[in-house]
Image (spheres, helix red, strand yellow):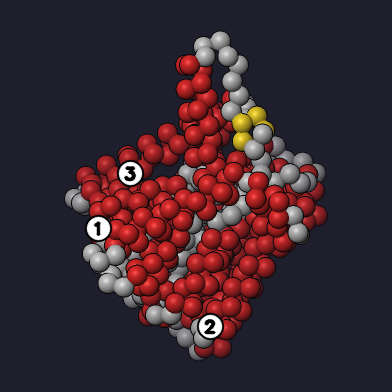
Amino acid sequence: MRYHIVLRYVGIILLINAAFLFISAIISFLKGDSALFPLIYTCLIAALFGAFPFIFIPPTEEISIKEGFTIVVSSWLLSCLIGMIPYVLWGGEFTLTNAWFESVSGFTTTGSSILTNIEALPDGLLFWRSATQWIGGVGIIIFALSVLPSMGKIGMMLYRSEISPLAAANFRYQTRETLRIIMTVYVGLTVAETIALVACGMSLFDAINHSFTTIATGGFSPKNLSVAYYRSPQIETIIMIFMILSGINFGLLFLSLSGKLKVLLRSTVLRTYLIMLFAGVVLVAVNIHGAVYGGWGETIRHAAFQVISIGTSTGFASTDSNIWPPFSQMLIVFFTLLCACSGSTSGGIKVDRAVLLWHAIKKRITKVQHTHAVVKAKIEGIAIDDDVLEASLLYIILYVAIVFVSSLLICFMGIDIMTAFSASAATMGNVGPGFGLVGSVSNFGNIPEIGKWILTGDMLLGRLEIFGLLLFFLLRSWK
């Protein structure tokens, strides 16, 4: 493997991080806050380490699959390392472990936090915290390829290494066109939400932060109480709309904006996604009405916000779901594991795999009933290859196994089972909040240090869809 080539393209990612660090430093300068020098120092580090390989190592026409995977995973890990430096230099609650946790949670768009007082952070650092989610939401490599579209065959290889096969199958375009679609929808949604939130009375700074983390389905908020701070049904409604949109495959959103609405109506995955969210809201609302909230208006408001927030892996909070009945909590756990659609910024197992699982079950039942029949699983009239079904089933099994093992390890540290399981599921699904000590209005500060490192591992595994990270650590065995 040509490590100098890997360094060159990882350098591009560091330069992108440096650009956002510079913007954060400008905000700190204008606000006169204490994050200015931590942000400037980190910006210089990222710029220097990014510029040297980019300038002095010549580009190449082609890279191998092995080099592509190394570039992708190295970019994620180094971005997380760079991201933690401003936190460590600023101090406060940020020990080395806490800074790493916050940075990984940002770039993987998990939204879990160790902070007990988010509002104590200076504005420059708050913006950087939200920016890490916006960069990570669209995918670090996809962001780079959109900034540098001239990378040709290199871009195609990196794109294929970055995006999951399940998501790639939903984009029936050339690589460059796909990148343009993703970035057009991503930036367009961000701008639209920012304008809508400002129109509802939110400050421009808060609106940008919330838009960054909504469209990335990340959930970082500059307020301790998250969205509950504003006590505004209008703001919650706007955020709910954009959370739902951000959980839809960006290719489908682009086609609908292009006037091809029939594609949306034909999508089995989209229908399943919306029906599941609607059913979840109804079931939770019926369960918590009277038991937690008196009026139907307040009940539906909080049920809808919390279900959509978790069901899209965003993780904002409008209320404390820790006080909800067990039935509602179990439904929230279900959405924590499942989340939204592939081809979006959402985490989790994905609705697409749930649909594939259902068709695999139907296929098996038919085969048992008709032993000699040739049965093909079909979605929207298209036959699904057995390899695709097998890969999806294996992914679900491995996903659940990792959540179970992580829960077991955290329980061993003396943490109660609800906290341990929900924390593992929430970090693996890049969702954010869980229950118990890590509830929707709590934080992960009480998790032991070793537990935080385990959970950051879950975040990275979930964001890179397990196999991406595993393959990186098995590079020596590649032929």
Q: Quadrant of the C terminus?
A: top right
Residue type for callout 2: Cys
Q: Tell me whether the residue at label 2 lies in contact with that at label 3, contact meaning CB atoms closer than 8 angstroms.
A: no
> In terms of image quadrants, where is residue 29?
bottom right
Q: Tell me whether the residue at label 1 lies in contact with that at label 2, contact meaning CB atoms closer than 8 angstroms.
A: no
Residue at x-position 49% and y-position 78%: 234
Q: Which residue is mark 3?
A: 406
Q: Secondary structure at mark 3?
A: helix
Question: What is the spatial separation of the Cα atoms under label 2 and label 3, in whole angstroms?
Answer: 41 Å
> In terms of image quadrants, where is residue 191?
bottom right
Q: Earlier in the sequence, mark 1 or mark 3?
A: 1
On screen, residue 201 versus residue 410, left or right, reads: right
Q: Position of residue 353 (x, y in %)?
A: 52, 39
Q: Earlier in the sequence, mark 2 or mark 3?
A: 2
Q: Which residue is mark 2?
A: 200
Q: Which residue is mark 1?
A: 325
Question: What is the spatial separation of the Cα atoms under label 1 and label 2, in whole angstroms?
Answer: 32 Å
Residue type for callout 3: Ser
Q: Position of residue 105 (x, y in %)?
A: 44, 59
Number of the front mark, 2 or 3: 2
Residue type for callout 1: Pro
Q: Secondary structure at mark 2?
A: loop
